[in-house]
Amino acid sequence: MGTDEFGIRPGEEMAALPAEFDAGLHFIGRLRTPWRTRQDCPKNGLQTDAVCTVDVDPAYAPGLLTITGCTHLILLYWMEHATRGLVVQQPRHAAGPRGTFALRSPARPNPIALSVVELIARESDTLRVRGLDCLDGTPLLDIKPYYASTDSRPEAQVDRAGADT
Ligand SMILES: C[S@@+](CC[C@H](N)C(=O)[O-])C[C@H]1O[C@@H](n2cnc3c(N)ncnc32)[C@H](O)[C@@H]1O
């Protein structure tokens, strides 16, 4: 998978990416899901009831201490097969082009994705969760507790009237 499957459509724009990276990352594990192709994946985690597995590398397993106190987690993961550099996109669902930073598309300069998942169980280095939307084997970047008190914004909108075009 790569730019062929995530090909550029008419009206889309690429930015020239710098030759050097500004920072490094450590993958802390892998996400195990039922989906082997992009077409099979849900578009977001609310579209599925599938129970998925978060395999945390043993070196980072001590970081799971007390995590079972959390009912919901924010998972950050790396969409490794996505096109990088797209700054204007033409989503199939939208009438016109949209800026990458106004989209949840995996195609972006740093292909970081997030989902709020329900934590069902912990077994040693493994978490069982519900609410993922990624391919099997997707690298895991981070896990954080989801705080309804500070992370929830029920008044939020995306397609509000009067937005720039
Ligand atoms: C629309 S994105 C949303 C991602 C995340 N929930 C977010 O909001 O950041 C989900 C889609 O990304 C694609 N995808 C899933 N896993 C991927 C991967 N490892 N690399 C590239 N694309 C992936 C699939 O087409 C899936 O339906």
Image: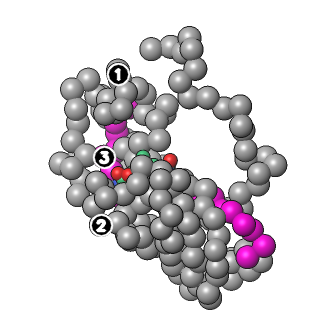
Q: Nearer the viewer, mark 1 or mark 3?
A: 1
Is residue 36 shown to the viewer in this render?
A: yes
- Indicate which disc residue 150 carries: none
The picture places residue 118, in percent across and down from the top left corner, at 63, 65
The picture places residue 27, in percent across and down from the top left corner, at 49, 69
Looking at the picture, tell me which residue is in the foreground, 101 or 48. Answer: 48
Q: Is 102 on the left-hand or right-hand side of 88?
A: right
Image quadrant occupied by the N terminus: bottom left
Q: Is residue 22 above or below residue 143?
A: above
The picture places residue 142, in percent across and down from the top left corner, at 59, 64
Badge 3 or badge 2: first in the primary sequence? 2
Badge 1 or badge 3: first in the primary sequence? 3
Q: Residue at x 61, y 29 (%)?
A: 157
Judge: label 2 CB < 8 Å from ligand 1.
no
Image quadrant occupied by the C terminus: top left
Decide whether residue 77 is among the magenta residues: yes
Crowd tier of the residue under label 3, counting other residues whose Cα lies within 10 Å: few below 14, some 14–19, many 20 or above: many
Q: Residue at x 34, y 66 (%)?
A: 35
Q: Is 66 on the left-hand or right-hand side of 56?
A: right
- Indicate which disc residue 36 carries: 2
Distance from Cα at disc 3 to Cα at disc 2: 18 Å
Looking at the picture, tell me which residue is in the foreground, 14 or 8. Answer: 8
Decide whether residue 106 is among the magenta residues: no
Amino acid at circle 1: Ala
Secondary structure of the residue carrying numbered label 2 = loop
Q: Nearer the viewer, mark 3 or mark 2?
A: 2
Q: Which residues are magenta?
A: 68-88
Residue picked out by circle 1: 95
Residue picked out by circle 3: 83
Asked where in the image residue 58 lies, by quadrant, the reply is bottom right
Secondary structure of the residue carrying numbered label 1 = loop
